[in-house]
Image (cartoon, rainbow, N blue to C red):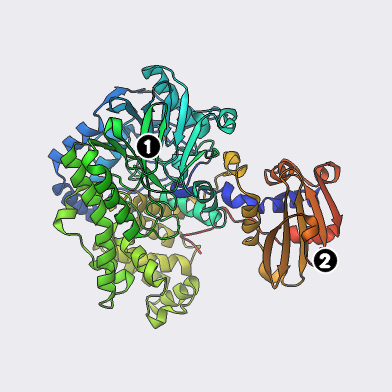
Amino acid sequence: MAGEGRMRLILSAGAVALAVSLSACSGPQADLPVQQAGTDEHSFSPADTTTLAAQANAAQEVDAERQSLDLELAERGLLAREPDLAITGPDGAVIWQPGRYDFLDAPAPATAHPDLWHQARLANLHGLYEVTPGIYQVRGYDLSNMSIIAGETGWIIIDPLTAAETARAAMHLVNRELGERPVAAIIFTHSHIDHFGGVEGVASAEDLASGDIRIIAPEHFTMESISENVLAGAVMSRRADYMFGRPLPASPRGHVSTGLGPQPAYGSVSIAPVTDTISRTGQTLVIDGVEMEFQHAPDSEAKAELTVYFPQFRAWCGAEIVSRTLHNLYTLRGAQVRDALAWSAAIEEARQRFGPRTDVIFNSHHWPVWGQAESQRYLAAQRDIYKYIHDQTLRLASQGLTPDEIAQTITLPESLAAEASVHGYYGTLRHNSRAVYQRYFGWYDAVPAHLDPIPRAQAAERYVSAMGGLDSVLDAVETALDTGETRWAAELAQHAVFASPDSATAREALARAYEQLGYRARSGPWRDVYLTGAFELRNGVEIFNAEASAGGLVRAIPLDLYFQAMSVRLDGPRAAERDLQFVFDFTDTGETFQVMIENGVMRHVQLENAGAATGESDAVITLTRTFWLRLLARDAGLADMLASEDFSVRGDRLALMRFFSLLETPEAGFPIVTP
């Protein structure tokens, strides 16, 4: 049955990119290994003397009064908490357990930046909170918040978390504490999975499909939610393992926070059909007696995003265009660079439109902002941080500085540096400035030597040779570590690893450098990136199953996107050996696609019917979307194709087999810190 196995494998190529990807927070997977709180597994090193000194300096900058106020605000309105909360998946495995972060109750250790530690502690607070009478939030049940508005008879849910399991537990807490009500409407504020993936935890798939529950979302929400990771999902997913520290234990020497909140919940995800689309600012709705005024804010924090103002509550939901952290203009998992000017303008539009009428701001992450004066100050800082980074990056670029030089030169004015809500717990000044440069000028920094550089492994071998060999380089690494030049130590050790990947000494030296850089990072993603690199140098790559929980999203992928995804899996050099052409006729949806392979390129076009195909096809494949999804889920194979009434081939079956054989399966665990 080798042919059947191969067929099943290659047929999954069109969907595997989505199935292994996680969207903006790099979404759900089913088998998160929950670590015991406070453990330091995998031999993490202690803080070295340079890290100890760096943390001591950072601690001197901590404003204890501000931190005390933060804690008071983060706990304001607490109605109920489940201290022993443990949320399980269908197989009984724990997928969410706030208690694994209980180590954060202790003072900040030398192995974590004290400001990140404080942010982590606040973001891990969990329970049901009252924002203002009639508006509530469940926080700490996932990476994001779920907000709940009390209508006349039912609930309006904003952003039902990442996973159905966590959303269901949050909804149970709401109904238990506030009284059970039906769900009248659901608002998806934007197209990142931690804001819609748990929708089937607050309403059944049948109720969602019926249209009885209003589903409100920004224009282009569905396509943006699904499409971002279809083409590049395998790479984004692998990089997200680093950004969110997926292999790391939650511990003082491991993962402590994303900066936005804890790690995302790795459970079951889906999406719901939109009934009400928001396409312009000022658009209004009244649902279950609740008035809503929307802001259409595309190309800000997400390609498709909205915010919503509630006049009768004098409350504004800022979605994720504002948070209690500097956000990402470029997210380290990999995504298109965000428009800093559009983002800043969206915040200013909201400040002017809603600010004078707002007594409380609540968002998709963190805790609310109460009071007119505080809200105005908060919005001004959030508005200005993105425009400042944009403007100063271009100013420094005009002086001839390269991205790396700009990142080392740019500083914040004291007025912004003093605002905790724009500290770099998630995004950072350094990598966001690089993002602005990239948006305007691309990857090339105009240095001729960087136009066609030697590949990393080859360059590493030559660097090591020029420095007198591996032992000489490793001696230099040790000297750099001893003298506190940790970034230089990491650069030298990375060359050593790429030149001699089998050297355990080189790997360990690089792991030690990465650890210390991770311990000192204020940004949660920077910490996780460094520590995940150290983890993999010592323990190898852990490959996580990503397909089991993504069925709800896979079912929503338009057929057109499947074919787009297949085209980027095509082995171009092999495909160029022979032109191929096929027609795929989906009888249950009435959709027909013509697929053409020429010059090693796959193109597809949607037809009115199979008879509208141009040229001579090698084969016409008649099938149903239902059977197609079975193939993609690997529930059907070659034997099913031969026996099923939902699949037939007219023409050259061998040509079809050749086509499928040309589709590569993405490598889930490709190396990053080793060649």
**Residue 210 drawn above or below residue 651:** above
The image quadrant that residue 616 belongs to is: bottom right
Q: Secondary structure at mark 2?
A: loop
Residue 616: image tag: 2
Which residue type carries mark 1? Thr
* Residue 329: x %, y % from top left: 36, 57
Measured Cα–Cα span from mark 2 to mark 1: 63 Å
Residue 183: image tag: none
The image quadrant that residue 260 belongs to is: top left
* Residue 317: x %, y % from top left: 33, 39
Which residue type carries mark 2? Glu
Q: Mark 1 = which residue?
A: 39
Whether residue 548 is visible, yes or no, is no
Whether residue 181 is visible, yes or no, is yes
Dot 1 alpha-carbon crowd within 10 angstroms: few under 14, some 14 to 19, many 20 or more: some
> Residue at the spot x=49%, y=33% of the render?
214
Q: How many marks?
A: 2
Q: Secondary structure at mark 1?
A: loop
Q: Would residue 404 be found to the left or right of residue 22 on screen?
A: left
Q: Would residue 520 be found to the left or right of residue 28 on screen?
A: left
Work out whether residue 124 or residue 252 is closer to the camera in this orientation and state it. Answer: 124
* Residue 164: x %, y % from top left: 51, 32
* Residue 509: x %, y % from top left: 38, 60
